[in-house]
C-alpha cells in the first residue's frame, strides 16, 4: 500500500488546479472574494460592521470575484445576491455564529505549524480510533480532545478518525448534517483549534483523518440552492433525498467544489487522509468517477506526505480500493461491515433486519479474516439481490474491522455499546480476535476501557417541525428491526434533539481506572499486535483458519522456519472440544507456549486454563488464547 500511495502522489502533482480558490482569500492589501453563483445576475459582499458594499465582477461560467482593499482576517461578511437578501459564503472557512450567521475571513498562513518532519501515514500497521469531538470529553472541544492524545498514543492507537466537523445547525450533531463544508464547526473551536489538534497529534506520532460527507448535505442552514440549482440532481436518489450532481449539467463546477474541499482538508489542515461516508450514494455515470479524480487530486495536494483514503461502502465494492491505473477508484481501504454483523449475531443472537444474512458461526468468522468480505457476489436475503465483489490479492490492511462504530452502536435501541449486550468473557474473546487479526482494527472512542456511556443518535434542531421529523425518522429507521418496531420499544428510543440524549454519550475517563482490567486487556493486545513480528506482518496469505465448534475457531499465523502463532477463540457459552484439526498441531519448533489468555484474572477473567491439555484441546466458553511455537 505504501508503494501505491507514493507512486500516485508523485505522478499526480501536475493535477493541482491553478485556478483561483473560492471563498475569501487574504491578499496583500486586502481580501479577494470569489463565489460560484450561476443562477444570479449580481453578487455583492456586505459586511457586518456596515462598511461599504463591495460588488463582485462576473468572470464567466457563473463565477463572481473581486478585491476589497483594507480588510483583514476576522472580518465578518455575507454575499448579497441580486440586490436582495444576504447569505453566508458557501466556501466560508469559519461560521462563528453558526450556519445562519455571517462568514468570517480567515488567514490560514497565520498558523505556525511544527510538523515539518511529518511524512504522513500508510494503512499497514495502523490502529484506528474513531471519535466524536463533542462527546469525547466533558468540554466537547478540540483543545480538550488534544489533551487526551498522549494517552491514546501510549495505549497503542496510531490513527485518529474524527467524525465530521463541517459546520452544522444547533448545539450538537453527529456531523452528518454539515452544511458549510469548508468551516470547522464553531462549537468545537475555531480553525486554529483544529490545526492545534492535528499538530499535537503529529508531534506524538499520531495520524489524523477526517470523516467527510460528499453524498448529501443537511437540511438546516443549507444555502447551496441560493447560488445554483445544479448542486443536486433528480437523476439519482439517496437515503437523504436528491443526490449531489457529479455527472449531469453543471457538474464540472460541482465536482470541482467537492474535490477542492477534499484537498483543502489535506493541505490547509495537514490531515493524513479522509474517511468517505456512504460512498454507495456518491453517484457518477461519467467517464471518470468523482472518487478516482478526488483520490489523485487529494494525494497531489499532500505534496511530500502520504495519505490514506478510506471508504464506507455498504455494497462492499472492491473497485474502490483498486488502483486507478487498473480501472479502480484508487482508495486505500474499506470498512468491513460483514465482520461486524457476524460477530454481532454471534454475541447477541439478534438476526433481525440487516443481520438476517448472518448466523454468527465460526465459519463466518474464519472466512471474514481469511477472505475479507463474506458476501462477494452471493444473493443477500436482506437486500434481495447479490451483494459484494470478489476479494483476491488485496492486502489485509485494506479492510477495516470493527466491533463498534458510531452507526452500529446507535442502531441498538438505546444506543447501548456491544459489551452491554453480552457477557464480559465472550466480549473479551471477541476483542482478542479483532485486535490480533491481520486486518486494520478500528476502536470506537471509549471502547478501549469498556465505556458505559451509550452513543445514541443526536441532532439539535431549533425548528420544532424539523426536530419532530428527525425523531420520527429515527423511530422509523430503527423500526426496521421488528423488535424495535413494537410500541413499548419505540417509546424507549432517545429523542435526538433532547439535551439529555447528547449528554448521555459523554465519555467518563475515570472509567479508565474503574474498568482497569478491560483497559489493560486492550493495551496488552495492542502491544502484541505492534511488537510480535508474526502478528505485525498482517499477511493474509500466510494465515489459515479452521472451525473447532459452532462458535469456536482457530487462526494460525505462519512465520519463518516454523515460528508460528496460534489463536484459538470460543465465542460460545459452553466448552468446545476440538476435533483432529491439523492447524492445532505443534510446529517444527515444538509444543505451543501461551502468550496471552482472555481468562487471565488481570483482565477480569476467572483464571487461566490451558486449552491444550493431556486430554486434547478443550476450549472454555467465552475465551481466547494466543500461543507461540516452541519454548522461550
Image (cartoon, rainbow, N blue to C red):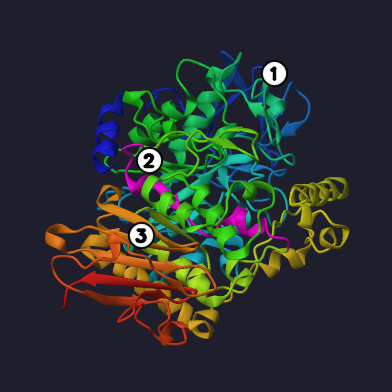
Q: Can you tell which mark lies on residue 332?
A: 2
Give the left or right position of residue 364, taking residue 95 as reference: left
Along the line of sight, which residue is nearer the eye, 329 or 66?
A: 329
Where is residue 571 drawn, in percent x and y?
Answer: 50, 67
In the rendered picture of this protein, how many numbered marks are placed on residues? Answer: 3
Residue at coordinates 83% horizontally, 49% vertically from top-left?
A: 472
Relative placement, left or right, of 140 versus 97 is left
Residue corresponding to mark 1: 40
Q: Which residues are magenta?
A: 392-413
Q: Residue furthest left?
A: 561
Tell me if residue 102 comes above or below residue 281 in the rendering.
Answer: below
Distance from Cα at disc 2 to Cα at disc 1:
40 Å
Q: Is residue 28 visible?
A: no
Q: Can you say which quadrant of the picture contains the N terminus? A: top left
Q: Is residue 409 magenta?
A: yes
For image coordinates 37% across by 67% down, the residue present is 568
User: Residue visible at 53% across and 28% down?
Assistant: 257
- Mark 1–mark 3 Cα distance, whole angstroms, equals 45 Å
Q: Position of residue 515 (x, y in %)?
A: 52, 82
Q: Is residue 102 visible?
A: yes
Sequence-wise, the earlier of marks 3 and 2 is 3
Image coordinates of residue 266 in percent, x first then y, are 41, 42
Query: From the viewer's perspective, is the residue at label 2 or at label 1 nearer?
Result: 2
The vertical placement of 347 against 96, above or below, is: below
Tell me whether the residue at label 1 lies in contact with that at label 3, contact meaning CB atoms closer than 8 angstroms.
Answer: no
Which residue is the site of mark 3? 206
Q: Nearer the viewer, residue 457 or 612?
A: 612
Amino acid at each position: 500500500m505504501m508503494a501505491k500511495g507514493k507512486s500516485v502522489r508523485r505522478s499526480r502533482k501536475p493535477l493541482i488546479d491553478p485556478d483561483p480558490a473560492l471563498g475569501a482569500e487574504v491578499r496583500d492589501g486586502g481580501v479577494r472574494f470569489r463565489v460560484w453563483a450561476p443562477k444570479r445576475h449580481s453578487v455583492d459582499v456586505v459586511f457586518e460592521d456596515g462598511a461599504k458594499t463591495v460588488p463582485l465582477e462576473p468572470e464567466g461560467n457563473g463565477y463572481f470575484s473581486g478585491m476589497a482593499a483594507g480588510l483583514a482576517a476576522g472580518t465578518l461578511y455575507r454575499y448579497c445576491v441580486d440586490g436582495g437578501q444576504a447569505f453566508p459564503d458557501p466556501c466560508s472557512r469559519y461560521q462563528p455564529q453558526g450556519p445562519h450567521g455571517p462568514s468570517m475571513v480567515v488567514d490560514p498562513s497565520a498558523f505556525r505549524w511544527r510538523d515539518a518532519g511529518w511524512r504522513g501515514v500508510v494503512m499497514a500497521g495502523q490502529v484506528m480510533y474513531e471519535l466524536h469531538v463533542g462527546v469525547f470529553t466533558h468540554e466537547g472541544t478540540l483543545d480538550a480532545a488534544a489533551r487526551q492524545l498522549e494517552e491514546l498514543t501510549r495505549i497503542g492507537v496510531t490513527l485518529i478518525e474524527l467524525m465530521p466537523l463541517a459546520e452544522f445547525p444547533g448545539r450538537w450533531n453527529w456531523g452528518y448534517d454539515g452544511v458549510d463544508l469548508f468551516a470547522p464547526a464553531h462549537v468545537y473551536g475555531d480553525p486554529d483549534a483544529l490545526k492545534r489538534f492535528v499538530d499535537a497529534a503529529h508531534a506524538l506520532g499520531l495520524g489524523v483523518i477526517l470523516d467527510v460527507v460528499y453524498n448529501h448535505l443537511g437540511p438546516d442552514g443549507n444555502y447551496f440552492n441560493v447560488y445554483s440549482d445544479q448542486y443536486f440532481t433528480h437523476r439519482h436518489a439517496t437515503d437523504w433525498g436528491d443526490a449531489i450532481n457529479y455527472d449531469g449539467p453543471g457538474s464540472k463546477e460541482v465536482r470541482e467544489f467537492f474535490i477542492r474541499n477534499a484537498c483543502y482538508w489535506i493541505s490547509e489542515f495537514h490531515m493524513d487522509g479522509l474517511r468517505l461516508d456512504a460512498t454507495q450514494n456518491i453517484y457518477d455515470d461519467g467517464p471518470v468517477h468523482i472518487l478516482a479524480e478526488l483520490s489523485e487530486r487529494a494525494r497531489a495536494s499532500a505534496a511530500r506526505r502520504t495519505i490514506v483514503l478510506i471508504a464506507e461502502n455498504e455494497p462492499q465494492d472492491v473497485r474502490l480500493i483498486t488502483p486507478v491505473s487498473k480501472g479502480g477508484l484508487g482508495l486505500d481501504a474499506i470498512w468491513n461491515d460483514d465482520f461486524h454483523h457476524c460477530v454481532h449475531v454471534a454475541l447477541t443472537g439478534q438476526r433481525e433486519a440487516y443481520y438476517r444474512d448472518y448466523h454468527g458461526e465460526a465459519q463466518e468468522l474464519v472466512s471474514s479474516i481469511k477472505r475479507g468480505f463474506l458476501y462477494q457476489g452471493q444473493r443477500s436475503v436482506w437486500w434481495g439481490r447479490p451483494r459484494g465483489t470478489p476479494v483476491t490479492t488485496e492486502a489485509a490492511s485494506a479492510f477495516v474491522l470493527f466491533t463498534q462504530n458510531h452507526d452500529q452502536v446507535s442502531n441498538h435501541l438505546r444506543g447501548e455499546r456491544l459489551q452491554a449486550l453480552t457477557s464480559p468473557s465472550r466480549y473479551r474473546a471477541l476483542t482478542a480476535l479483532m485486535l490480533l487479526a491481520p486486518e486494520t482494527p478500528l476502536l470506537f472512542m471509549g471502547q478501549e476501557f469498556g465505556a458505559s456511556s451509550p452513543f445514541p443518535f443526536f441532532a439539535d434542531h431549533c425548528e420544532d417541525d424539523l426536530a419532530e421529523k428527525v425523531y420520527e425518522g429515527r423511530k422509523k429507521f430503527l423500526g426496521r428491526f421488528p423488535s424495535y418496531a413494537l410500541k413499548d420499544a419505540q417509546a424507549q428510543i432517545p429523542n435526538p434533539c433532547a439535551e439529555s440524549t447528547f449528554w448521555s454519550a459523554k465519555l467518563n475517563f475515570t472509567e479508565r481506572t474503574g474498568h482497569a482490567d478491560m483497559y489493560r486487556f486492550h493495551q496488552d493486545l495492542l502491544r502484541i499486535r505492534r511488537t510480535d513480528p508474526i502478528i505485525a506482518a498482517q499477511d493474509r496469505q500466510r494465515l489459515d483458519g479452521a472451525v473447532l465448534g459452532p462458535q469456536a475457531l482457530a487462526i494460525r499465523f505462519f512465520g519463518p522456519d516454523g515460528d508460528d502463532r496460534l489463536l484459538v477463540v470460543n465465542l460460545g457459552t459452553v466448552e468446545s472440544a476440538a476435533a483432529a484439526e491439523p492447524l492445532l498441531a505443534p510446529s517444527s519448533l515444538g509444543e505451543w507456549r501461551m502468550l496471552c489468555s482472555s481468562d487471565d484474572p488481570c483482565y477480569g477473567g476467572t483464571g487461566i486454563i490451558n486449552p491444550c491439555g493431556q486430554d486434547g484441546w478443550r476450549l472454555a466458553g467465552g475465551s481466547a488464547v494466543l500461543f507461540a511455537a516452541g519454548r522461550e
